[in-house]
Image (spheres, grey):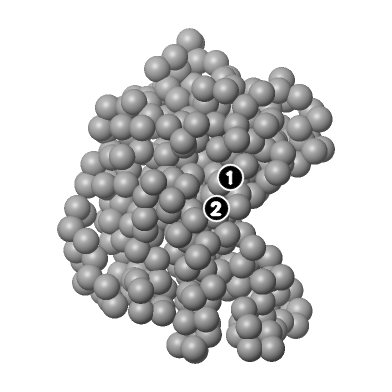
Amino acid sequence: MASSLLLLLLSSRLSLSELHTPASPNTTPQLEPTTQGEGLLSVPATNASRKLPQTIIMGVRKGGTRALLEMLNLHPHITVAKTEMHFFDWDENYQQGLGWYRQQMPLSLPDQITVEKTPGYFTSARAPERIQAMNSSLRLLLIVRDPAERVISDYTQVLHNRRQQNKSFQPVEQILIRDGEVNTNYKAIQRSLYHLHMANWLQRFPLGQIHIVDGDLLIRDPLPELRRAERFLHLPPRIQASNFYFNHTKGFFCLRAEGHERCLDDSKGRRHPSVSARALSQLCTYFEGHNDSFFKMVGRSFSWCRGDGAPEQNITSSDTFPLGQAWPHGQ
């Protein structure tokens, strides 16, 4: 009996990175979580319940939403939905109603915040109104990153998928640049026009309810960004520098908690294809005006393209830098 119980508890503690398939109306509720406790033998909470999320993480594809979710899940007062629900941007899910949506949420204790993450909400025309109708006081976490770098990451993901399926693909610069100009019809570029999407959200939510996370800084130096997120969510600071370690092979920070270590899945941190300096300069020049509009809209600026015609580069240094200390550019 004891061994069976232990196997059940072990099977319920799956990594989030193993459970990020988008939800569908046929999704069954997740296994019952246990209370925060010592070791694996925590017992199911008797006062836990499924709640609609009080916080939603949104962004754009390859913007860092998965990293933010898994890092916030280190906090004992946060419990997260294990899948991207796509409730507010997919009509077939939204038509299932809030009762169905609530059943997809994890069990949580009274002092825990339930967090759901679906990047597609940010670019959805319908999501702002639908989320406001559910809870007009909900807090939103928007993660953004250098739009030029994000476009290349977006292409890299599609390239990987097409190679896996033995499908043909176009070289990156043939997609980015058409007839000497930036290809503004490319969906990856349209996703990076943050101010256009942000305008829809500000029609439904005041800026004070939307906290913007710098995705580039989150990857380079997670703790300061997470501290700001904790304050925004009115949570005590519980995530510590000891929760992170730099993985030399992957080239980014991984997570450590309760004696266990894990990294984001292999879809994170893929090496980008080579792009000419001229193409990158064109991309950065195109985004400059759009970025300025976003900066004015949110009252904050970001170090995108660094003013020298090139986006920030991926960090691949084998050196470890302490959390709280900025990573040097160009590593």
Is residue 261 visible from the viewing direction of this image? no
Is residue 129 visible from the viewing direction of this image? yes
Q: Quadrant of residue 43?
A: top left
Number of the label disc, if any, that sits on residue 199: 1
Q: Position of residue 160 (x, y in %)?
A: 62, 73
Name the secondary structure under disc 2.
Answer: helix
**Three-letter code, disc 1:** Ala
Q: Are marks 1 and 2 in contact (CB under 8 Å)?
A: yes
Q: Position of residue 60 (x, y in %)?
A: 57, 54
Q: Which residue is depicted at the point 57% across and 59% down?
A: 193
Instruction: Report whether 255 appears left or right of 50.
Output: left
Number of the label disc, if any, that sits on residue 195: 2
Q: How many marks?
A: 2
Q: Quadrant of residue 62?
A: bottom right
Q: Which residue is depicted at the point 72% across and 39% down?
A: 126
The quadrant of the rendering that contains the C terminus is bottom left
Q: Position of residue 222 (x, y in %)?
A: 31, 51
